[in-house]
Every structure is written in structure tokens, then in C-alpha cells.
Amino acid sequence: MTLEHVFRPRSVAVVGASDNPSKLGWSVLHNIVTYGFRGRVYPVNPGREYVHCIPCYASVRDIPGDVDLAVVVVPARYVEQVFLDCAEKGVRGAVVITAGFKEIGPQGEELERRILKIARDAGMRFVGPNCMGIINTDEDVSLNATFAPTQPLRGSIGFISQSGAMGVAVLDFSNAERIGFSKFASMGNKADVSGNDLVEMFGRDPNTKVILMYIENFGNPRNFITIARKVSESKPIIAVKSGRTKAGAAAASSHTGAIAGEDAGAQALFKQCGVLRALTIEEMFNYAEAFAAQRLPRGKRVAVLTNGGGPGIIAADAVEGHGLEMAGFQKSTVEALRSVLPREASVRNPVDMIAGATASTYRSCLSILLKDRNVDAVLVINVPLGKETELETAAAIAEASRFTGKPVLACLFGRKESSEGVRHLIEHGIPTYRFPEGAVRALAAMWRYRSWREKPKGRTVRFRAGREEAQRILDGAMSRDREWLTKREVDHLLELYGFRLPKGMVATTEDEAVRIAKKLNYPVVMKVVSDDIIHKWDVGGVALDIKGETELRRQYRRIMSNVQKKRPGARVDGIRVERMITGGREVILGMKHDSIYGSMIMFGLGGIYVETFRDVSFRISPLTDVDAQEMVEEIRGYQLLAGARGEKPCDIKRLKNYVLRLNQMVTELQGIREMDLNPVIALPKGAVVVDARVRLEQHGSQ
Ligand SMILES: Nc1ncnc2c1ncn2[C@@H]1O[C@H](COP(=O)(O)OP(=O)(O)O)[C@@H](O)[C@H]1O
Ligand SMILES: [Mg+2]
């Protein structure tokens, strides 16, 4: 079912229309009338004959003509009856502004369920309840069905807000900034129409060039990934997400569990579907203005043109800091700049025309820069030196940018939206910022989006694996209500999925340990094997780099006595003697089940780095090969793995392969709640999992 009746109605009933200006029922009708709705409007209120000098009806059922959309502002207790009336009348869409539903507790939740059922049975779609309304600025429709005090400007931004109050504030703010909207929707409780529905619809809307979202929580993150990924291929989605999840904090017995809390899920989700995340509402609009008005840059080489040295340097720093590059000019560019600029000016990037620059200097230099083949975008900065020249300069900038295919962003240093020059630039499609950083950040977002759009989409990879046997191991342990797999089970599971483990065996006596070590060749590692001990190192249960028999015997006894001292009650199965893996780097691979986002996969530097630097990356499973590649490459320590300072590089390919194998494990096996492979030692050739833990889903846990 489409949302056509909601956003493009030919007739609207305002149920609960009021002639008391302090009521929402007044504001909504007032907005619909004064914004110039192109269709018919019917106030509905059983106590009035007229509202706003428009004939009023006692019930939706009494309205003589068809009604496409009902905007409901009656008190909560009447909403159910209104819905029944709408159903009978054959109304196809509704916006329920009324609050007092799910957000107030079980009673409201029940009411919400009931109206949803009425709507479903009648084939009626509705936005809300508990929302601020919707807007469609399309000239053929001109519908402002909100109670906001500000009328929106027409433009190409579609805005979806989970908070009504935020919606009001945003309309107000954007009016002052001269930002225009194509459509606006406040989602409210999302009983029927979800954020995903709206993204999909705005995605198809030809008037919407950029989609903005204010999100507090996801109803269905999986669906969001699929839908947003598809929409992002043709238009950018920019989101502010607040209300970080607490889901991760509870389960902290694995590293992955401990680190995956807070915001990791949202962050991964946005990355995986190309949604640009802004940290503040202001930043979101900074991005939006650039996306709405300008083309995407074809590369990341930026030219900065300024009449003041300081701002130029600030801009250059921001360019480097946000992952863009300062362009190196062609020789002809440098020569051309030389010929129009005084000797004291700098013709290198940032181009400093110095204080004497006039409007015409701006015009010539900008034209020269835009012609340079090594320049993908230009940031023009103007420090105000006189009010008279501001408009002239702005006009010159707009004119020089008129026929270029490259994005031009401007910064009129420190000036407000109300100033003439800024207005002129914005009206001529040049996004204009108060400070260089804002402009650069927007440009960087455009470049990130462009890169996302152009990168290969990735595919899912399947390896041969012993899936059934692995599932049997998990089922067996779960049927005995165990929380963890034993060491033996973990190793078996990993082998079934093609992970390499160090050779080794469990000894139950010192002499046996000696025999095993001889077979393996020194150096060896010993570690206690006990289901009661989760962190072996912490209890003195691990000995590394044992080079001979005497040392081995000493360490054997040391481990036994350590364990007895620190974990007197622990049942010890023996001591595992295994090959010491040398000449590699430790990484961690993990997975955690998140109640909101599902299985999250983690990759990072292992050992001490996990805890101290938290240098890890997350993605939500299922992963593609491109996801796995990015996960490995995006950690800060990637340079260490790739062979910094002439060291031997690790087998990166194998690490990506391991990420995908883990992904396959968690997608096709049931019952794993958390898993740490820590560490995996990445070697120049291959990688070995030297320690791992698998925590099971239990009855009673989520
Ligand atoms: N076979 C091995 N080869 C090389 N180093 C190892 C080996 N086994 C363990 N280590 C090192 O010892 C550390 C602790 O061992 P591990 O088995 O991870 O115990 P735990 O995590 O329970 O404390 C590892 O992080 C790793 O640095
Ligand atoms: Mg470990």
C-alpha cells in the first residue's frame, strides 16, 4: 500500500478542528489553510457549525465528498471512534497527532493496537500517533498538516523526524537558514507507517534530493539496512542518531561483548548502508545544503581560494584532517594566477589573493581554479573588508561557478544568514558557511558519499564447512544448559569452519607434558585446561616460550600451584602443551549478539591493544567480502599489520578470510551468543587461532 493518500491527498478532514488558538486543533487547520492547500479541507467537530469560517461536520461520516486524509487531533479516548468512522467513510490515510498511546504505558499500548487493527482491516495507512504531522511542499499539493508555528520553505530536502519537538525546532531553524523542504514527516510512535516506509517513499519522490533523519531508535535495523542501502545508491541519506543503546553493557564476559556496547551497532549500521552520520542537527543541515545545491566531487582534491592567510591555513588543515587533499595545481594554473594577482599573493594552494582582492579578482581566480584538471572542488573564502563589497564579491563567486561541473562551496567568514552576500550565494546554489571547517566537513561528506556509491557492492562468500556437526556440538551443550563450550568443543567447532589451531595435546602429568613437548619441538606454550577458568592468564595459568625440559617441568608445577592458589575449587582437566607461534601479530576476532542489531562482528588488534586502545571495527552480520575487507583495513593499527617500517606484512588476505568464516559461522549456526577468538596470531603466511571462547545462548537470556 502506498502513502499516496497521506502525502498527496485531494481532500483532508481535520478531526478535532478548533477555533481556540491555544489548541493544536486550531494550529493544524490554520496551517493547512494559510499554507494554501490545493485540495478541499473539512473541519470535523461535533460542537461547531463553522471553524475558521469553514463549514464544520459532526463526524467524518457526515462529510459529503470523498476524504483522502484524516488529520486526527481529538483526545486519545475518541481516536478509536474516529478510526471506525474513517473506516466506514473509506478514508485511506490518516495522521494521528493525538498523544496518549504506547508512550504512556500498557493502557495506551492496547489502544494503539486497537486503532492499528481498525486501520489494517480498512486498508488505511497512518502516521503516528503522538506525532507532529506531515508536510508536502509540492506546488500541486501544498499541504502543511502540522501544528508547527513556522511555515516551511519549498526546497529539495526530505526530513523524517522521530521526535515531534525536534521537528518544530528544525522547521524554525531551517527557516532562519533559508533551507527548503520537499517533504517532512514526524514519525511519532510508528504504529503503522515506519521510518523505513518513509525512507522508501522519500527515496522514490522526485522532489526530494536529500533525505535527512533524526532517529532515536530503530524499529527494524535489518530492514533499514536493506532499504537505506538501496535508496543511498541514488540519493544521500544523512542521519542524526541519539539515544544510544544500553543493550551492550549487560553482557561483558567477552571482549567483544564489553566493547560492542553503546554505539557500535548504530555506527556499523550506517556504514553498511551508506548513510552519512552527522553528530549534530547543525552538521546535518550543513551537509544537506551542500548535497541539495551542488554536484558531488569527482575526486578529493580541493583548491582553497582566500583573501586572508589565516582562514586559508585553517581550511587547508581541515582538508587534510577530514580525509581530503589539497590539490597541486597544473603549471598553467599557477601562471594564470600569477598574471592576475599581485606579487605578494600566494599562487599555491591555498591561494591567498591577500586583502586587496576585489570582486573581479575573485571572479578571475575562481574561474582559473575551476579549469584546473587537478582540482575536484573549490572552497572560496572571503574575509569581510567592507560591507559595500560583500554583495559584489558574492555575485562574482556565484557567476564564476555557474557553468562548472565541480562543486564550489563558500565561506563568508563569520557572517550570518541574514547578510546580503550569504543570501545571494545561497539563492544561487552556493552553500555558504560561516567558518571554513563547516564547509570542508560538508565537502568531505560529499566525497565519502561519492566513494561509497562507487565502491564495489560486495558479495556474500560461502566456504565449505561442517555445519551439521557444528550445530550438534552447540545443541548438545545447550541441552545441558551450559553457558560456555569446553575448550575441546571450541577447537572442534573452529576446525569444522576451517580455522587453523596450534598443534598440541593435553597432558595430565608432568612426564606426559615432557613427551608431548618433545614431539612438538621446543619452544612450546603451556596453559591450564579448565572449564571453570575463563581467563587463564589472569590466574597464572599460561607459560610461554618454554625452551627445554627443565623449564617445562618448572612451569608445569608453577601453573598447577598458581591455579590451586587462585582458583582452589576449579576442576582442572590437565595442561595443554602446544606449539609456540612466533613472528606474528595478535588480532582479535569476535562476535556478539545484540538485541537490537543482531549478530555483530568485531575485528581489531589483539592482546593488550584490545583493552587499551579499543582499536576495533564492527559490522552487522551478514557481511559481504567488501565489508570484511573494510573491517580489517579501517582499524588504526592496520599499518602494523600491513608491514609498517619495513617489517614483514601479515597475511591480510587470510585475516579477511577469517572474518568471513566467522560471519558464516554466526549466520548459519544457532545458539552462539558471544564469541572471542583472542588472540588470532597473524603470520606472514596464514593465521592461527591460539585461544577462543564461545558463550551460548541460554534459556531465559535474550
Ligand atoms: N600457542 C601460542 N603461541 C604464542 N603465543 C601464545 C600461544 N598461546 C597463548 N599465547 C599468548 O598468551 C596469551 C594468553 O593466552 P590465552 O590462551 O589467550 O589465555 P587467556 O586469554 O585465557 O588468558 C595470548 O594472548 C597470547 O599472547
Ligand atoms: Mg586469550
Image (spheres, grey):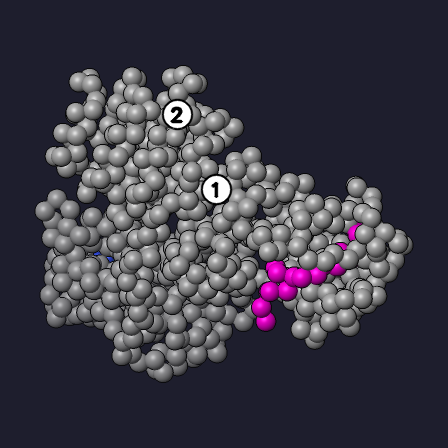
In the image, residue 545 lies at what x, y percent?
Answer: 17, 55
What residue is at 30 percent from the left and 30 percent from the top?
A: 363
Classed neighbour count for the residue bearing mark 1: other residues with Cα under 10 Å, few (<14), some (14–19), many (≥20) = many
Res. 594 visible in picture: no
* Marking on residue 392: 2
In the image, residue 124 lies at what x, y percent?
Answer: 67, 69
In the image, which residues are magenta? 1-18
Res. 392 visible in picture: yes
Q: Does the magenta stretch include residue 9?
A: yes
Q: Which of marks 2 and 1 is nearer the N terminus?
A: 1
Question: Which residue has dot 1 on it?
Answer: 285
What residue is at 20 percent from the left and 39 percent from the top?
A: 372
What residue is at 45 percent from the left and 52 percent from the top?
A: 209
Badge 2 element: helix
Badge 1 element: helix
Q: Which amino acid does label 2 sit on?
A: Glu
